[in-house]
Amino acid sequence: KLVVFLALFLPGAWLAAQWWAGALGPEPLKEAIHEAGLWAVRLTLVALAVTPLRFVAAWPRVLLLRRMLGLAALAYALLHLGLFAADQGFDPWRVAREIALRIYLTIGFVTLAGLGVLGWTSTDGWMRRLGTAWGRLHRLIYLIAALALFHFFLQSKADVSEAVLTAGLFLWLMLWRAQPMAWRGRLWPLPGLAPLAAAATAAVEYAWYALATNLPAERVLAANLDLTFGPRPAVWVGIAGLGVAALGLARRVTLRRR
C-alpha cells in the first residue's frame, strides 16, 4: 500500500517537473489540464481493474488498494478542475458559465460530482451507515466511468485514438463483469473476452467517426486489419486481453509450484 501510495504522486510530480522545465508546449496550462484529466480517467480504470485482478491472479489482498486508487482518481479530477479554473482566471462566474454552456464541460462536471460523492462515502463509517445501499451507490462508478470516457471523446476533437483505447479497456472490464459469477475465478473464459473486447472497441471507433465526424468511418474500421502503420486501438485491446489471460496462467503455475 505504501509503494502504491507513493507511486500515485508520480504523475503529478512529472507534470510539475514538465511545467517547471517549460516542456508542456506553447499552451502549458491547457496541456496540464489535459494530462490531469487523463490521469483521472486512467486511475478510474485501474481502480475498476482491481476486482478482475483479484480473481484472475488469485490475489485477494489487492482489494486493499481499491479505495486508495479511487481517491487518487478523484484527486486528479479535482486537479483537472482546478487547472481549468486557473485557465479561466479563477473567475467563478466565468467557470460556471463555461460549464453550463459547453456540453462536454457539463458532462465532465457531472462526472467529477459523481466521483466526489463516491469519494465522500468511501469511508468505513459511511459503509456502516448505508449498509446494503452502499454497494448500490458505489456501482454508479460504471456510469461515472462511461461519462468520463464520453467527456474524453468530446474534448479529443479529431484524433480519438487514445480515447478509443481507453474505452476498449473499459469494455473489457465490463465484459469480464458481465460473465456469470462462477466463471470469474476461471481462466478459460479469458481468451474469448479478448476478441470480443477488440471487436467492441472497433465498433466504438467506427460509431464515433461515423456519427461525430466527416471522416470516412469505413476506412477507419478497415484499418484495424491493416498493421502497416501500427496496431489500431482495437488490436491493442485484444493484445491486452490476451495478456491478462497469460498473467492468470503464469500466476496459477507459480502458486501450484509453491
Image: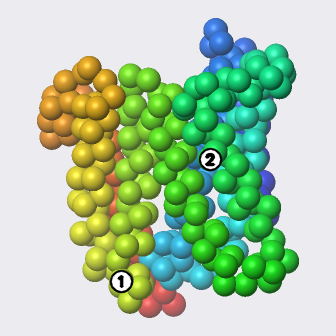
> Residue visible at 69% across and 43% down?
77
- Image quarter of residue 62: bottom right
Residue type, numbered disc 2: Thr
User: In x, y percent, where is residue 245?
Assistant: 35, 70
Using the rendered image of the protein, determine whether residue 234 is visible from the camera's viewpoint.
Answer: no
Secondary structure category for the residue under label 1: loop
Q: Is residue 93 left or right of residue 59?
A: right
- Residue at mark 1: 180
Q: Position of residue 179 (x, y in %)?
A: 35, 77
- CA distance for labels 2 and 1: 29 Å
**Direction top: furthest residue:** 26
> How packed is label 1: few (under 14 Cα within 10 Å), some, or many (20 or more)?
few
Q: Residue at x 41, y 48 (%)?
A: 167
Residue position for label 2: 111
Give the image location of residue 38, x and y in percent.
58, 38
Q: Residue at x 71, y 23 (%)?
A: 97
Q: Amino acid at mark 1?
A: Pro
Q: Nearer the viewer, residue 199 or 225?
A: 199
